[in-house]
Image (cartoon, rainbow, N blue to C red):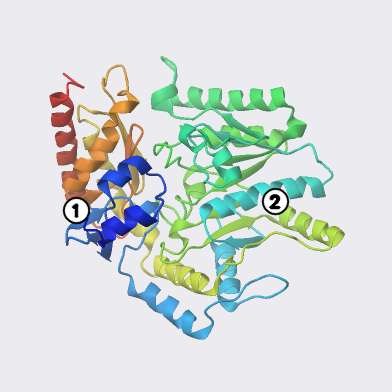
Amino acid sequence: MNDRPNSLHALDKQSLVHPYTNLAVHQETGPHVITGGDGIYVVDDEGRRYIEGLAGLFCAGLGFSEQRLVEAATRQLKTMPFYHSFAHKSTEPGIRLAEKLLAIAPVPMSKVFFAGSGSEANDTAIKLIWYYNNALGRPGKKKIISRRKAYHGVTVATASLTGLPFNHRDFDLPIANILHTDCPHYWRFAEIGETEEDFATRMADNLEAMILEEGPETIAAFFAEPVMVSGGVITPPKGYFEKVQTVLRKYDILLVADEVICGFGRTGNMFGSETYGLKPDMISCAKQLSAAYMPISALMINETIADALVDQSRKIGTFSHGFTYGGHPVAAAVALEALTIYEEIDIVGHVRSVAPAFQERVRKLGEHPLIGEARGVGLVAGLEFVKDKATKENFAPALQVANQAGKFATARGVLTRGLGDMVSLCPAMIIDDEQIDDLMTRMGLALDDTLTWARAEGHVA
């Protein structure tokens, strides 16, 4: 890549700290600069065209060239480019978007709080859970349970909820009052002879045991993604959420559904909660809320929580939480237009129509010698790399086999990421059958390239 002293590549290395990047390696390799997009494709600064296999970061649901979203932003910029919602102020786009979200929520919700990212929405949920229990006179009911391999964000609090070791290592996390229960990955963690439903029962029993050990009076909430996408596209085993929710109700524990990735059609329903039968007390959403064209997130809360917030703010004299750009009118206008487009093109129906072919090709990739399990739902899938398919033994982490597969995918014209033992696929939801075929063919070639490399390096026989 071009690395002249004044090139973008050189300037990038001099100027930027890149998230989720080996910063030492980046100083050697430099950036991959993306300059344009068209539908499900993006183009880099050398004119190379790629299928964006992750819709950016699981977010560009309508692809990279939806002009109606550009026009919605432009109209709002000309009308009212910014205003806030502090101290009784409001804007029409924010009001309309809140109304729309409440109308399409998978279970009855009462109020919406806007922020700028999924991390901020989940961080707000944590604060509101603590505020809510203080309002109810339960100052000891503050612990929050997440799951191993969960992903809920990168703020101090939400990175603590996240159940991935690298999000904690050397950041002095997790903070107090955050607990992690089992990862419900049947293929990886089921005992010999254990049925999927028996495994789900064991997961719920272990959760209940944790609650009883800690003291139910100390447990405030349970966070869950319908599908644990960033942790490896882990879909819940049969009966899991039904059993877990029975435990939560038994001990008066709130359920927060993290719909940041699953929301707005990805799983074949408008929300992943509908796909897997969640009945949450709070719902966080972001990413596809605006199809990624503007940064915006939302936290929906039920009536019981909303009423407690009102009562407590009356007592204190204010509700002292909020973000400057929460409910930004341009972002809200774009999100409204995105939701309108989803309805007009029946994005849920489209996902349902193409998902069978997508998942069938994913399962076919699962037959590859390097893939232990290929899993997914709707238009999201994960490929787990193993050294031995029979024993499910993973490669040594230092080999970074999945990361190498991601590099081979790039060479084959697909942008995706290798994280740990996983490569994920989550294309723009507007993808069609022909494009799915092209995507999967390229991924198959990338897996073959990875196998050739692994054999040459002596990592497999």
* Residue 456 in picture, x, y percent from top left: 13, 25
Residue under the image location 25 percent in, 33 percent down: 366
Question: Tag 1's secondary structure?
Answer: loop
Question: Tag 2's secondary structure?
Answer: helix
Give the distance between the C-alpha atoms of the residues marked 2 and 1, in whole angstroms: 47 Å
Relative side of 456 to 137, left or right: left
Above or below — where is 149 with respect to 129? above
* Residue 157 in picture, x, y percent from top left: 61, 43
For the residue pair 235 and 125, the one nearer the viewer reads as 125
Q: Nearer the viewer, mark 2 or mark 1?
A: 1
Amino acid found under the numbered disc labelled 1: Met
The numbered disc on residue 245 is none
Q: Seen from this angle, which residue lies furthest front?
A: 5
Relative side of 207 to 386, left or right: right
Q: How many other residues sit within 10 Å of disc 2, few (<14), some (14-19) or many (≥20)?
A: some
Instruction: Please say whether residue 39 is visible from this viewpoint.
Output: no
The numbered disc on residue 128 is 2
Relative side of 453 to 66, left or right: left
Judging by the rendered image, the residue that carries numbered circle 1 is 1
Above or below — where is 73 with respect to 134? below
Instruction: Please say whether residue 15 is visible from this viewpoint.
Output: yes
Q: How many other residues sit within 10 Å of disc 1, few (<14), some (14-19) or many (≥20)?
A: few
* Residue 304 in picture, x, y percent from top left: 74, 53
In primary-sequence order, the first of circles 2 and 1 is 1
Residue under the image location 25 percent in, 41 percent down: 406
Q: Seen from this angle, which residue lies furthest top?
A: 192
* Residue 437 in picture, x, y percent from top left: 18, 49
Q: Are marks 2 and 1 in contact (CB under 8 Å)?
A: no
Residue under the image location 39 percent in, 73 percent down: 69
Amino acid found under the numbered disc labelled 2: Leu
